[in-house]
Image: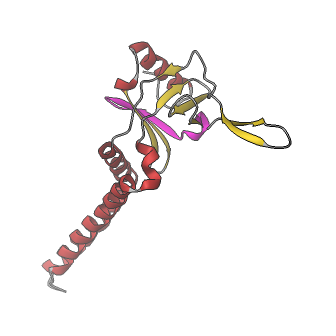
Amino acid sequence: MAKGYSSQGQGQQKRVQQPIPSNPLAIKTKKFALEKNKFITLNMLQFVRKQWYWGFVPLALILINAIVNVTKVYPNYWIYVITVLGALAYVAFWAIQFTGVTQLEQYKQLFQKYRYEIDSRQILMKLNDTEGGIIKWDMIKTARKEKDAYVLDMGQYQFIYLPFTVFNNDNDKKLIDRILKDKGYISAE
């Protein structure tokens, strides 16, 4: 947030909000708010992409139990139920966590309408002309172009979601493609 102080004489200062400086050549998007369901979906997809290999644990337990049952060493069926319930409970736990974020007051800023100004130096997230924040490109870990949006990952379960509909024209989409390619986030086709 761009804030400054002006002097009022005799050592007193008054807090003044100043406009956030913007680059006239930057890509300027329409105002956009991330939908809560989209937030949950994207986080669950990231969860699956990062932790898919843990799915082998319940499969291995079921396989071991099947072998033990067939050989009649220790016949039981409860391990099948517990394994499936445990796996489902783990996935449900994360779904509840992501859903909970959408309901908490301290995270409401994630779902406010922002206007983005993107150039090769930074990404400005503007709530209005005087409120917003700066995200430097070195804070972006990975980026990907999906069929209907750009997703800029900033860390575990933190991202900027930019659907194609927020761009004013095709030139803006081509320019962000160029910036992401130059930064090495997406490959040149």
Q: Please, which colouring scheme is shown? A: secondary structure
Question: The N terminus appears in which quarter of the rendering?
Answer: top right
Residue at 21 percent of width and 69 percent of height: 84
The percent coordinates of residue 44 (x first, y second) are 33, 51
Which residue is painted at 37% across and 39% down in the image? 34
- In-front residue for pair 132/34: 132
In the image, is residue 140 part of the stretch drawn in magenta? yes
Q: In this view, does 155 lie above or below 147?
A: below
Q: Is residue 127 above or below residue 84?
A: above
45 sits left or right of 17 in the view: left
> Percent position (x, y) of residue 139?
58, 40
Residue at 86% x, 42% y: name it: 10
From the viewer's side, name the closer residue of 14 and 171: 14
Q: Would you identify the image quadrant in which residue 173 lies? A: top left
Residue range corresponding to the magenta coloring:
134-151
The C terminus: image quadrant: top left
Q: Is residue 86 magenta?
A: no
Looking at the rendered structure, the number of numbered marks drawn on it comes to 0
Of residues 6 and 114, which is closer to you in this image?
A: 6
Does residue 113 appear left or right of residue 80 in this picture? right
56 versus 106 height, above or below:
below
Q: Which residue is drawn at 33% across and 46% down?
A: 36
Residue 183: percent from the left, percent from the top? 56, 28
Residue 46, position as x, y percentages in the image: 38, 48
Q: Based on the displayed image, in which of its 4 quarters is residue 174 positioned?
A: top left
